Amino acid sequence: MIPDTPAGRFAPSPTGDLHFGSLLAAMASYCEARSKKLEWQLRIDDIDGPRSVPGAADSIQKTLIHYGLTWDGPIRWQSAQHLRYRHALATLIDDGLVFSCSCSRRSLPPGKVYPGTCRHNRLTSIDEPVVDKALRIVMPETLEFDDAVQGTQRVDVAATVGDIIIWRRDKLVSYTLACAVDDATDCTEVVRGADLLQSTAAQIAIMRYLSLPAPRYAHIPVAVDKNDDKLSKHSKAATLDSLDPLNTLQRAWHFLGQKGFETRTINDFWLQATDHWQISQVPAALRMAELQT
């Protein structure tokens, strides 16, 4: 299935407030889509109910609007796509690619990929009873794809990712499967952080198994603090709501390697940003983010 409308997307998880790293992904994906006259979608990746924070989805929407980022069409919620993911799972099982796994995290080698212990437990039907086990998919050995920022990527998926979980022990679809299906079905452009390159390789493998078209990818540099730690909700990075919007937009623009311009309003910033945007100028490497309130 080819997406009906060429589009980019921003897909945050509702696990907390947006931070500078979130803004980088939003800005880059927005500018890449708008500069090509494409739609820009907002998808809330809310499949992991236990990790979702009450009110976070509303906060994300308000923050994007506060920073002048507007999306096309209704918000897409992953929690509303369960049947889509079940259908994909059934296809992968029918093709003999899925097996049940009883291995706990403690039983696996620390810092190593899954060694294929349960590969012999192949499923033959989605209706086959599976109790207290995760479902994993057999990954290909190598995979190659082009990235607009990082260049051609040749990934040894078997060695670096391994047979990943696509359906969790608690009966929830995994991020990898859900994201692969949604991106292939709804998007033509995916711009996100370079820390997800290996995850992208696994998602492309799933897309190919499902005969779905992969979108075009661009993986931007990840913002880190003075300790070289990635800015994230986990690292308690400053929330966007605590920063000055226009100043922060200009800092994000500079971080992404773009040519500066004069602006005094948020609306004018976006008008100029979409005209000036050049994906070819985005640096590939990790960069430190120096933020001021």
Image (tube, rainbow, N blue to C red):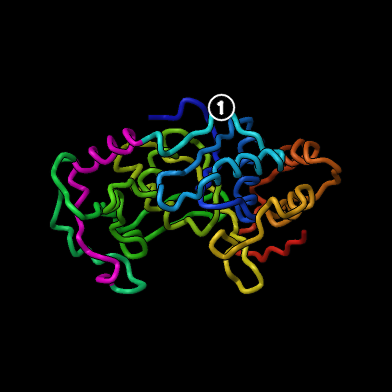
In the picture, the quarter occupied by the N terminus is top left
Q: Residues within 10 Å of mark 1 (few under 14, many from 20)?
A: few
Nearer to us in this view, 229 or 52: 52
Q: Residue 138 sits in which quadrant? A: bottom left
Nearer to us in this view, 29 or 63: 63
Q: Which residues are magenta?
A: 82-108
Residue 144 x, y percent position in the rendering: 40, 53
Nearer to us in this view, 35 or 178: 178
Q: Residue 100 sits in which quadrant? A: bottom left
Q: Residue 9 sits in which quadrant? A: top right
* Up/down of 194 relative to 27, above or below: below
In the picture, the quarter occupied by the C terminus is bottom right
In the displayed structure, does residue 74 sit left or right of residue 46? Answer: right
The residue tagged with tag 1: helix, strand or loop?
A: loop
As drawn, the residue found furthest toward the front would be: 54
Q: Total number of numbered labels? A: 1
Q: Amino acid at mark 1?
A: Gly
Residue named by callout 1: 73
In the displayed structure, does residue 274 sit left or right of residue 215? Answer: right
* Up/down of 65 relative to 197, above or below: above
Residue positioned 58% across, 30% down in the render: 39
Residue positioned 64% across, 58% down in the render: 283
Nearer to us in this view, 62 or 42: 62
In the displayed structure, does residue 31 sit left or right of residue 269? Answer: left
* Up/down of 71 relative to 258, above or below: above
Residue positioned 63% across, 54% down in the render: 19
* Up/down of 224 relative to 1, above or below: below
